[in-house]
Amino acid sequence: MTNALLPQAFWFRMAVRCPQVEEMPRANGAKRLLDLPASCVLPAGARLEGREPWAEVRAGWNPRGLGIAVLAQGVAEAQLAADRPEGFADVQVWVDTRDTRDVSRATRFCHRFVAQLRVRESGRKLDVQVAQRPIARALADAPMSRPSLIESRAELSRAGWTLELFLPAQVLHGFDPDTNRRFGFAYQVADHTRDDQFLGVGRDFPIGENPSLWGTLELGA
């Protein structure tokens, strides 16, 4: 059998339900920032290629904002070095609060957030740096938000690692669930020891700058 010229994910545009989760972000002192249930699990493009994903991504929303959790299985020993220049892992998330399907360049409603994870000197704790970044070739830039507005929490365990992000409504230009319940959405999860994970197509395509390649989150009840 010959290899396919295009990945299977290219033939699909994911439209997935994003449940409403009222209790997020959780109060200071709670073990989890979000604690999203299994009903929030998003598809992984790897399965369309016959590969088992190593990370599970979940998404939930409420009128206060959008919550995203990454649950990764396993940790390579080489990742635990605190002096790795590339860090422990990183996660990128793209959100279009208008779910624009007919343009190939980002609008002012398109956002890119980058979370970089690093190992502390102790070797068993993770630090997170989250920031909004511009999108290349955008027709117009979304307003840039202060990193301090974005809540995050990361945890390292024997089973793997977890990252939780809460993007409040004020960092998502155009966030208005009363009038629009469809968001364009894409993610990339990388830990530098395994193939990156995506919702749909990967970096063979310009997902970082072309919102027409993103999937759709349908904000449910």
Image: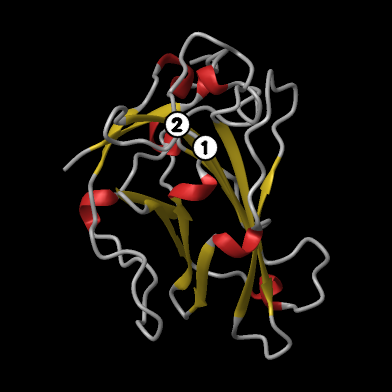
**Identity of the residue drawn at 69% across and 18% down:** 139
Q: Is residue 44 visible?
A: yes
Kindly identify the residue that appears in the image at 60 percent across and 13 percent down: 104
Give whichever of discs 2 and 1 has the lower sequence position: 2
Residue 125 point in image, percent of width and height: 60, 83
Above or below 81: residue 92: above
Question: Which residue occupies the extreme bottom position in the image?
Answer: 122
Between 17 and 142, the residue placed more toward the observer is 142
Tag 2–tag 1 contact (CB < 8 Å): yes
Residue 56 as seen in the image, left or right of residue 91? left
Residue 168 drawn at (x, y percent): 45, 54
| Relative height, residue 31 to residue 147 (above, below) | below
Q: Residue furthest top?
A: 102
Foreground disc of the pair 2, 1: 1
Q: Which residue is mark 1?
A: 173
Q: What residue is rendered at 56% in x and 70% in y?
A: 75
Q: Please report the residue visible at 61 percent of the width from the left and 21 percent of the height from the top.
A: 210
Q: Which mark is residue 97?
A: 2
Question: Circle 2 — which element?
Answer: loop
Identify residue type, mark 2: Thr
State the image coordinates of residue 175 (x, y, percent, origin top left): 42, 38
In-front residue for pair 35/139: 139
What is the quadrant of residue 35 in the picture?
bottom left
The disc labelled 1 sits on which kind of residue? His
For marks 2 and 1, give the CA distance.
7 Å
Q: Which mark is residue 124?
A: none
Q: Is residue 91 above or below residue 78?
A: above
Crowding at label 2, few (<14), some or many (≥20) Cα neighbours within 10 Å? many
